[in-house]
Image (spheres, rainbow, N blue to C red):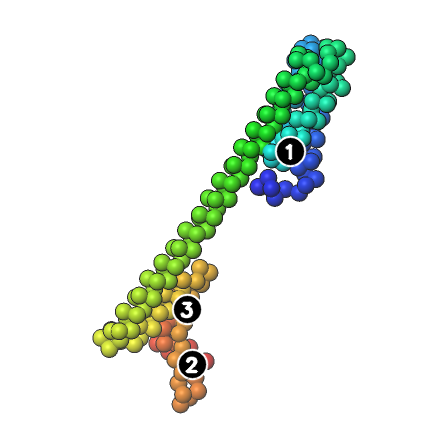
């Protein structure tokens, strides 16, 4: 399923779940690894970038930096403006750059997929037009040679071409009018087994 097509609450749920997983992992691992567990903050930032794009990645990075400061300040005792420790300026800039990069890549991938989808649609439309032109050319040629190949063959070609050009069609019938008896008689039948030689009249 396309990420864009997911409901908004599902997107938010996934991102918040990643934040929760990060905080839980940090809670259990900080005593062993210290502020190094802040590296795991890349997970919610990456997910937010994938789900919400460029600005989502930036916003998640900002939120993660704030969480890092609140969660790890008591362990490293550094100021926000220091260049070391959890939530430091380099860490904040790195997370912001990471989130922006992931969001940008997501946008580029989406653009590429949209372009491929549009290209396939145009290709399908072109193939359809080619089939139509080919059918019209064959019918025009048959009409010009009606006396030689017979009207029945021309009508059968028209019916067969109509079935080919309509994707869901499996059968095609051309009726001729019997004005004396006021009946429609099958003149060209494609795809029916029991309607031949005027056996079914309307």
Image coords of residue 129 (percent x, y): 39, 59
* Helix, strand or loop at mark 1: helix
Question: In the picture, residue 183 is in which quadrant?
Answer: bottom left
Seen from this angle, which residue lies furthest bottom? 180
Q: Quadrant of residue 88?
A: top right
Residue count near mark 3 (Cα–Cα under 10 Å), binned few <14, some 14–19, many ≥20: some
User: Residue at position x 40%, y 90% from top?
Assistant: 180
Residue 27 visible? The answer is no
Q: For the point 26% across and 73% down, which residue is it? A: 144
Give the Cα separation between the discs numbered 1 and 2: 66 Å
The image shows residue 172, relative to residue 202, as above or below, that is: above
Q: CA distance from mark 3 to mark 2?
A: 15 Å
Q: Horizontal placement of 132 versus 45: left or right?
A: left
Single out the mark in the foreground, 1 or 2. Answer: 1
Q: Is residue 141 left or right of residue 180?
A: left
In terms of secondary structure, where does tag 2 sit?
Answer: strand
Earlier sequence position, callout 3 versus callout 1: 1
Q: Which residue is mark 3?
A: 172
Q: Secondary structure at mark 3?
A: strand
Q: Quarter of the image containing the C terminus?
A: bottom left
Which is nearer the eye, 91 or 172? 91
Which residue in the protein does label 1 denote?
Answer: 56
Q: Could you say which is closer to the camera, residue 178 or residue 26?
A: 26
The residue lying toward the viewer, choosing from 132 and 91, is: 91
- Residue placed most toward the observer, 137 or 189: 137
Spot occupied by residue 17 in the image (x, y as percentages of width and height): 69, 30
Crowding near the residue tagged with mark 2, few <14, some 14–19, many ≥20 C-alpha atoms within 10 Å: some
Badge number at residue 184: 2
Against 26, residue 192 (above or below) is: below
Tag 2 or tag 1, which sits nearer the N-term?
1
Mark 3 or mark 2: which comes first in sequence? 3
Residue 70's place in the image compared with 201, above or below, is above
């Amino acid at each position: 399923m396309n990420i864009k097509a997911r409901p908004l609450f599902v997107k938010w749920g996934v991102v918040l779940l990643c934040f929760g997983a990060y905080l839980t992992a940090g809670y259990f691992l900080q005593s062993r690894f210290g502020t190094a567990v802040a590296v795991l903050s890349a997970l919610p930032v990456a997910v937010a970038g994938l789900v919400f794009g460029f600005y989502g990645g930036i916003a998640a990075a900002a939120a993660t930096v704030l969480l890092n400061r609140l969660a790890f300040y008591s362990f490293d005792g550094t100021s926000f403006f220091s260049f070391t420790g959890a939530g430091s300026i380099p860490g904040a800039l790195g997370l912001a750059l990471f989130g922006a990069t992931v969001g940008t890549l997501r946008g580029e991938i989406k653009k590429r997929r949209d372009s491929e989808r549009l290209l396939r649609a145009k290709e399908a439309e072109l193939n359809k037009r080619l089939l139509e032109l080919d059918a019209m050319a064959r019918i025009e040629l048959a009409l010009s040679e009606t006396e030689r190949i017979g009207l029945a063959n021309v009508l059968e070609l028209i019916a067969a071409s109509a079935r080919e050009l309509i994707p869901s069609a499996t059968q095609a019938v051309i009726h001729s009018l019997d004005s004396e008896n006021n009946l429609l008689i099958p003149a060209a039948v494609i795809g029916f087994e029991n309607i031949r030689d005027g056996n079914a009249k309307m």
